[in-house]
Image (tube, coloured by chain):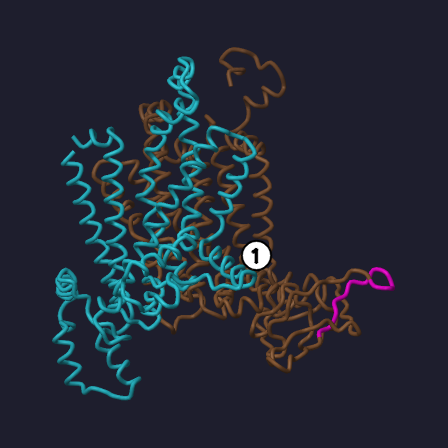
Chain colours: A cyan, B brown
Amino acid sequence: MLIYVLRRLGFALVTCLFISVLTFVIIRLPPGDFVDAYIANLAASGSSISVDQAAAMRHEYGLDRSVLVQYWNWMSRVLQGDFGVSMMWRRPVTEVIGDRLWLTMVVSVAALFLTWVIALPIGIYSAVRQYSFGDYVFTMLGFIGLAMPNFLLALILMYFGFRYLGLNVGGLFSAEYVQAPWSLARAWDLAKHLPLPAAVLALAGTAQLIRIMRANLLDELRRPYVVTARAKGLTERRAILKYPVRAALNPFASSIAYLFPYLVSGSIIVSLVLGLPTVGPLLLQALVAQDMFLAGAIVMLLGVMTVFGTLISDMLLMWIDPRIRLEGR
Amino acid sequence: MSATAAGDPPASKAEARFAEATQLQLTWWRFRRHKLALASLVIVALFYAVAAFADLLATNDPHATDARRSFIPPQGIHLFDENGFNPHAYGLRGVRDMRTFKLSYAPDESRKLPVRLFVRGYDYDLLGLFRTNIHLFGVQGAKAGEGIFLFGTDQLGRDLYSRMMVATRVSLSIGLAGVLLSLFLGVLLGGISGLYGGWVDTLIQRLIELLRSVPTIPLWMGLAAALPNTWSVTQVYFAITLIISLIGWTDLARVVRGRFLALREEDFVVAAELAGASQGRIIFRHMLPSFASHVIAATTLALPAMIISETSLSFLGLGLRPPAVSWGILLQDAQNIQVLSGAPWLLLAAVPVTVVILAFNFLGDGLRDAADPYG
């Protein structure tokens, strides 16, 4: 078991390393380097620096060294929590991101929980009452959920909210709490705004999970042990919930691993439509302005966040499923 | 299917037909039983027909802007008038609200624009081959600024219906190109992984796991944003295709690997091996036919993801760039809630996206079921 945990942890670290390399590639992709961009930025605001100063800056940031050394320097600074300076905002990247990263996390995790809460009962219902009217309705809804990209759903909800209810459905906070410091009232305000973006994000994943849950449970329900349980006079509720549902839950739990990156990914674009104060809008601004340290930091942090989300789900899975626990021996 | 067990003469014609059917025929028969998948096949075919004949179907030049006709609401075609069958649309009269200075349009019933089949419009290349200006339907003898706007116009006065036709071509072809590239990568890497096993397999599987655990949209955004501004529309198009397929191949690789692993143990493969068939012959003659249909099904199921990716990227303004027209670019106009509440028809571009993704999903499901001989 310990070996399994260590192996997953090792893999998570390798993934983080891989993400850091990708991020570094993205930072370096635009033509020119940080100093070029800085000079262009200065020129836009009317000031300039001399060639010597530029050379000094390049030396200071190690831009005159080889790519490997540059990666190493960048990486060691990142490990100390220093992501560099955002050119657009002229402040340290960590300060610019602020609590946006946590809000991204909150939205994604909320969507994940919502996915479970919706998919579990509907999945069981659809399997137990296979081919019933309700099953067809949920299957149909599920297909629409799969087919509609979540930003489209967000757009449509925005439109109807604006047009027919006269309210602006975007945002994560009411106007009076946007700038307010954290307090219980602000957290409660966040909780009130959370369901809509979480639901928008959760829809596609829920549809997928319902289908998986339904298929798994259908397989389990046909097993002889269920017949035996019924023959022995167990109540229907007990005969279904006690063993088949638990056995069908396994793939359900493993789905977290692929749902979470997907949700984080989706939150970026949904945040843009709904105007959520997550890292999504910031990432787009940074990329358009080629503020590469800010963009790189966001890509990197999101990647690392997902990897650890996946790691947690793996641990959870191990806790639920003894087969995985034993495999590691 | 025990009816054609060894030695028994086929009992009836139907069974004889079944016994002699090729793999492809069997698959097709099984596929035909899925009505939903069959209908989806028709829808997908129609979409590709639209893509091929986009300019023929368009009624106005999709790129022509006209400030005098911005945000015209969708117009209908009236089939009959007092003289019987005479398809026509009404001309438009701009009315300016003197309080808000907002221009709105009202049909001008005194001016009838005759709508006919095969009218002359803007020049284009039919199927990229013949230069022509014939369009399937449109206003006959339209003057500048006149025309029918079936789905309304956008802010710059471009006809949304015509733009949607052209966008279909771009969005569907980028999906197809992306999926072909993923297919190549997936079959190559999945095949190597399944065929050789050992450390190569472990390496490729770990790579797939890596790619899958990274959130894709930020990654795409980062890569797409790095494309130089100076690139032409075509260059950006191919770069976006490449970016999308770089991540999309993992699912296909998994399917191919899974089939390779399963088939490697089959008796007929072992028999071929013992008979001294070369590796190439075993793969292409014996194994490939029995998993080709699975790969086709997986490819079909991968297409919607490609289309969504392109739409998302273009929607964000990081994908294709105007003057290219794709569904994502059309939806970009609908991003602003103020604009949207005044011109809700801009959301119409969401309809083809949803329909085609649904159709591909059903089609892929049907193909997958049909391809499985034990299903």
Q: Label 1, secondary structure: give it.
A: helix
Residue B30 is left or right of residue A91, and the answer is right
| Residue B187 drawn above or below residue A302 | above
Q: Residue furthest right?
A: B83
Q: Position of residue A118 (x, y in %)?
A: 42, 42
- Above/below status of B286 relative to B114: above
Q: Which residue is mark 1?
A: B51
Q: Nearer the viewer, residue B297 or B153?
A: B153
Rendered location of residue A223, percent (x, y): 40, 20
Residue B150 visible in this rendered orientation of the protein: yes
Q: Please name whichever residue, B282 or A131, is drawn nearer the observer in this view of the structure.
A: A131
Q: Which residue does the image show at 38% across and 47% down from the upper left?
A: B184
Q: Residue at x 51, y 43 (%)?
A: A141
Give percent across and percent down for residue A258. 33, 45
Q: Is residue B237 magenta?
A: no
Residue B104: x and y in percent read 65, 74
Region rendered in magenta = B81-92
Which image quarter: residue A74? bottom left
Principal SS element in the magenta part?
A: strand
In the picture shown, does residue A29 fall above or below A313?
A: below
- From this viewpoint, which residue is outermost toward the front? A185
Q: Quick one: label 1, few (<14), some, or many (20+) residues within 10 Å?
A: many
Please check the rendered image and state whether residue B89 is part of the magenta-colored stretch, yes or no: yes
Amino acid type, mark 1: Ala
**Residue under mark 1: which chain is it in?**
B
In the rendered image, is residue B223 in sight? no
Q: How many numbered tags mark residues here? A: 1
Quadrant of the image occupied by residue B92:
bottom right
